[in-house]
């Protein structure tokens, strides 16, 4: 494993106070699923969804002096409700709290049971733990399949499930091998510029700012997704120019590339090399072979 990647991943893991934890239970009489990710500074990130609707909601907040507070916002970004868990205990198999509507002061009891922890360590082994993702499509939502091999310190994403909202019917499953990146491994965008949403899975963080993802495109004829084969470092997608931009930083310099999508394939139209000029104190363009 790349030493720099291992160090950054290790530090990110250490920054988490508890790691990701999955719960299921009820707010009032309504069944829900909740996933939390709590950091050592008290920053708490969470996702929850009512099981009858499967519309994931991000409810970030704080853990302070044993009280976990999570904030639910409406579609306009305004605070809508607060979920409060007094005497929060990560080791407990049960989690109880109160959901409070800020508009009408209505309160509902929260009763949850822990499903599992995403724990770390070389001697730990488990498979196929599923984490709901914060983004979704109009009729479908996503779950990561996460596994942990013995002898490997970190868990990895080994699969992605696409499920139908309200019925939980499995539509598709893809086998992958990706780094687990908190609660946000999946993104939605129109990656081939055809006017239809696709999705991507965060794959890896390399040395420095370089990252990679796996891209899955939607086929309107089959109404299914397929792995695109798109590849590159730190890709950015510009819907205005319908251009894919790549930025790859290394010890040799910085290489950039521009691509167009033709028949669902990335076709390079321009490549450039930039190296640091000590006299000018800026990146200057050089022949492409100097960055290779």
Image (tube, grey):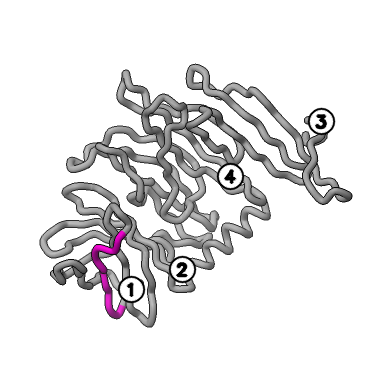
Sequence-first disc among 1 and 4: 1
In the picture, measured across the screen, residue 139 lies left or right of residue 207, that is left
Disc 2 versus disc 1: distance between alpha carbons?
Answer: 12 Å
Q: Residues within 10 Å of mark 2 (few under 14, many from 20)?
A: many
**Marks 1 and 3, Cα distance to the nearest angstrom?**
55 Å
Within 10 angstroms of label 1, few (less than 14), some, or many (20 or more) residues? many
Quarter holding the C terminus? top right
Can you identify the residue that label 4 sits on?
211
Mark 3 element type: loop
Circle 2 sits on which residue? Answer: 39
Residues at marks 4 and 2, CA–CA distance in whole angstroms: 22 Å
Task: Specify start and end residues of the magenta stretch as a single range.
Answer: 78-87
Separation of marks 3 and 2 at Cα, in angstroms: 45 Å
In the depicted structure, whether residue 186 falls above or below residue 99:
above
Dots 1 and 3: beta carbons under 8 Å?
A: no
Q: Kindly identify which numbered label has been placed on residue 266.
A: none
Residue placed farthest to the bottom in the image? 65
Residue at image coords 57%, 37%? 235
Picture disc at residue 287? 3
| Mark 2 or mark 1: whose residue is earlier in sequence | 2
Looking at the image, tell me whether mark 3 or mark 2 is earlier in sequence order: 2
Q: Check if residue 129 falls in the magenta segment.
A: no
* Residue 104 falls left or right of residue 190: left
Going from N to C along the chain, the mark reached first, 1 or 3, is 1
Which of 11 and 156 lies nearest the eye of the viewer?
A: 11
Q: What residue is pinned by disc 1?
A: 68
| For residue 31, side relative to residue 149 (left or right) | left
Q: Residue 74: x and y, percent?
A: 27, 56
Mark 4 or mark 3, whichever is nearer to me? 3
Q: Is residue 145 above or below residue 190?
A: below
């Amino acid at each position: 494993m790349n030493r720099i990647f291992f160090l950054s991943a290790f530090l990110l893991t250490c920054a988490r106070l508890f790691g990701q934890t999955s719960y299921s239970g009820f707010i009032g009489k309504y069944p829900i699923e909740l996933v939390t990710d709590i950091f050592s500074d008290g920053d708490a990130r969470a996702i929850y969804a009512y099981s009858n609707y499967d519309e994931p909601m991000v409810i970030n907040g704080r853990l302070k002096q044993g009280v976990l507070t999570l904030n639910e916002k409406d579609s306009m970004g305004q605070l809508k409700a607060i979920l409060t868990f007094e005497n929060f205990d990560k080791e407990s198999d049960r989690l109880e709290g109160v959901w409070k509507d800020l508009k009408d002061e209505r309160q509902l009891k929260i009763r949850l049971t822990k499903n599992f922890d995403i724990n770390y360590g070389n001697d730990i082994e488990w498979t196929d733990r599923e984490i709901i993702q914060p983004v979704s499509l109009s009729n479908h939502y996503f779950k990561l399949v996460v596994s942990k091999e013995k002898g490997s310190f970190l868990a990895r994403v080994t699969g992605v499930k696409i499920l139908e909202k309200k019925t939980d019917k499995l539509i598709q499953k893809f086998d992958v091998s990706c780094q687990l990146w908190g609660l946000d491994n999946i993104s939605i965008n129109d990656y081939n510029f055809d006017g239809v949403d696709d999705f991507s899975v965060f794959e890896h963080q390399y040395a420095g700012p370089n990252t990679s993802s796996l891209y899955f495109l939607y086929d309107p004829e089959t109404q299914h997704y397929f792995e695109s084969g798109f590849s590159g470092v730190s890709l950015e997608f510009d819907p205005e120019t319908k251009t894919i931009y790549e930025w790859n930083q290394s010890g040799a310099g910085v290489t950039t590339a521009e691509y167009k999508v033709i028949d669902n394939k990335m076709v390079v139209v321009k490549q450039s090399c930039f190296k640091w000029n000590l006299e000018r104190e800026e990146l200057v363009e050089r022949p492409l072979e100097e960055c290779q």
